[in-house]
Image (tube, helix red, strand yellow):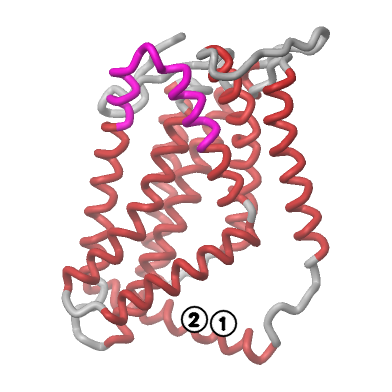
Amino acid sequence: MLRLSLTVLDLPLLLAGDPLAAWAAFLQSFGIILREGVEALLICTALAAAAIRRGDGRGPRPIAWGAAAAILLSLGTAFLVSRVIELSPADQEAIEGVTMLLAAAVLFYVSYWLLSKLEVARWMKYLQERVEGAGSQWALASVAFLAVYREGVETVLFYQALSGVAEAVPIWGGLLAGSLALVVLGIAVLRFGLRLPIKPLFGITGALLYSLAVVFAGQGVHELQEARWISETPLAGLPRIGAVGLYPTVETLIAQGVFIVLALAAGAVLWSRRGRTVVPGAKAARSEAARSEAGASVAAAAQEI
């Protein structure tokens, strides 16, 4: 296996077979950081709006402190994960395989708009209740920390898995480009009250990342086969294309087939619910007005950060 440097702290890159094309790795890396970063930005914006509605004068500063601490700890987590993998050379194939399959499962969940929307709604309700009940700046900061660190852990998982199927340079390029895009979006949202087209944005990045989940599924099973954790049943006449996780074995094809079937099922559910009125018009209008008011409050309060 080929080792390359991925992170600023020498994260090992273990290529399982042929790496992704440079352009594909760049887009996947860009999509990961953009998707997770936008989710963190939206969560912090909602938490700041809830803090402002409290009217206690603290504003969003504790939210910013908690988010900053979560970002730093996420970087520390990335370093720790890389070192654990590096110190376990005998089990690297198994660790990489488990990491890829876990990342594929999480990517399926966050890429499916209907399921993730319901989960995010519950998550945001919990966080906003915590904000309303927070009695100090430390309590507010801890809520923001919890919310952002959760996104950070997902990001670490995805990049660790991506490092097993792509070269370091395009991954770095996508990471830096996505981070720059996040900075621009953050300034636009917090300083100028820009409203992001959330559903199209999440739809595009979700489709991009779900294609990566299919790659992770095939590569993950292949790694576990190399570690002798899973049996290997060859299929004659099929090509081996490691860059897309395609290996001529029954086990890898079943794993990828499961994710493809899940994608088709999710698409069928989305199509069947297309055009249904989930929220009455008046209620939807009130909800939209509330979101606009909260966004304006956050944009004004952000001037004080």
Q: Residue at x 43, y 38 (%)?
A: 157
The disc label shown at residue 288, or none = 1
* The C terminus - image quarter: bottom left
**Left or right side of 202 for 140:** left
In x, y percent, where is residue 83?
Answer: 28, 25
Which of 246 and 49 lies nearest the eye of the viewer? 246
Q: Which residue is mark 2?
A: 292
Which of 296 and 284 lies nearest the eye of the viewer? 284
In x, y percent, where is residue 134?
Answer: 24, 77
Q: Is residue 305 visible?
A: no
- Residue 63 vertical position relative to residue 200 in the rendered view, above or below: below
Q: Residue at x 64, y 53 (%)?
A: 112
Q: Quadrant of residue 179?
A: top left
Q: Residue at x 47, y 69 (%)?
A: 194
Q: Determine whether label 1 and label 2 are within 8 Å by CB.
A: yes
- Residue 159 vertical position relative to residue 206 in the rendered view, above or below: above
Q: Quadrant of residue 232?
A: top right
In x, y percent, where is residue 189?
Answer: 42, 66
How far separated are the C-alphas under marks 1 and 2?
6 Å
* Label 1 Cα neighbours within 10 Å, binned few <14 / some 14-19 / many ≥20: few
**Left or right side of 248 for 171:** left
Secondary structure predominantly adopted by residues drawn in magenta: helix
Q: How many marks?
A: 2
In x, y percent, where is residue 292?
Answer: 49, 81
Q: What kind of residue is marked 1? A: Glu
Which residues make up the magenta segment?
81-102
User: Is disc 2 placed on a helix, strand or loop?
Assistant: helix
User: Is disc 1 placed on a helix, strand or loop?
Assistant: helix
The disc label shown at residue 255, or none = none
Q: What kind of residue is marked 2? A: Ser
Q: Is residue 291 visible?
A: yes
